[in-house]
Image (spheres, rainbow, N blue to C red):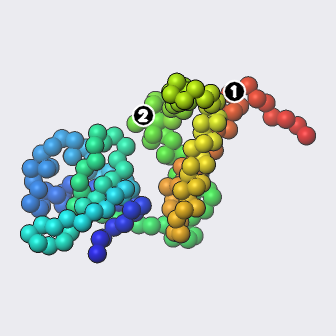
Amino acid sequence: MAKFEIGDKVRVNISKVADGDYKETCLNPMMRDFDGRDSIITKVRPSYTNGELTFIYELDLDDAEYPWNWHEDWLEPIEKPTTDQVTAHNILLAASQHMIDRGKTYDKEGGERSMSATVEAFKAVTGVDLTESQGWTFMALLKAVRANQRTAYHADSYEDMAAYVGLAAEAKAQEGYTNEIN
């Protein structure tokens, strides 16, 4: 039975790789860059080594050029939040941190700002003209659908959805719309 399943949050522990039979793997500088990184399991598949069943995992590592194969011994579980830790406040804090982290990885220090280029590329490919706020709304809806396709709570879907709603509101305000007073 697999130690982890798709959607589980894990942390990479390179020291465990160094203790095993894969020392040459640790010599790869890119591999060392992932040490201590938190990620989410995206794929699980069986592997047979010397006739023994083990499992190989792929992780959602934002800056990985291609999926690495991670053995379960190289990963540590990140404790799942208890019910009392899942609060609106904590979800919004996590969403805010995700935007900051993704901004550093993909865009700039000001946070995630990739939608403008995304909607321009979408228009070039499809001919459909979306506004930036519509692009963020689309992403929020995608996360809402994903969250409701699972029976279990999946923090990532709700945290990302919260971030996308905030980005949609910011973009809508910048598109020249003002608050209407009823």
Query: Which residue: 28% across, 43% down?
Result: 66
User: Is 128 in front, or is 33?
Assistant: 128
Residue 144 location, x and y as percent? Answer: 59, 54
Q: Specify the quadrant of the image occupied by residue 78.
A: bottom left
User: Is 54 in front, or is 27?
Assistant: 54
User: Is 51 in front, or is 155?
Assistant: 51
Residue placed farthest to the right in the image? 182
| Disc 1: CA contacts within 10 A as few (<14), some (14-19) or many (>=20) | few
Residue 8 location, x and y as percent? Answer: 40, 63
Query: Which residue: 50% across, 46% down?
Result: 97
Q: In screen coordinates, is 7 left or right of 56?
A: right
Marked residue nearer the N-terminal end (1 or 2): 2
Compute the Cα span from label 1 to label 2: 23 Å
Q: Which residue is mark 1?
A: 175
Residue 149 location, x and y as percent? Answer: 54, 62
- Please state, as top left, top right, bottom left or bottom right, where the N terminus lies in the image: bottom left
Question: Taking 125 as reference, is 49 above or below it?
Answer: below
Query: Which residue: 58% across, 61% down?
Result: 148
Q: Which residue is mark 2?
A: 106
Regarding mark 1 in the picture, which secondary structure is present there?
loop
Query: Which residue: 33% across, 53% down?
Result: 59
The answer to whether the residue labelled 1 contacts the one labelled 2, judged by CB atoms less than 8 Å apart, is no
Q: Is residue 13 visible?
A: no
Regarding mark 2 in the picture, which secondary structure is present there?
helix
Looking at the rendered structure, the kind of residue marked 1 is Glu
Question: Taking 25 as reference, is 51 above or below it?
Answer: below
Looking at the rendered structure, the kind of residue marked 2 is Tyr
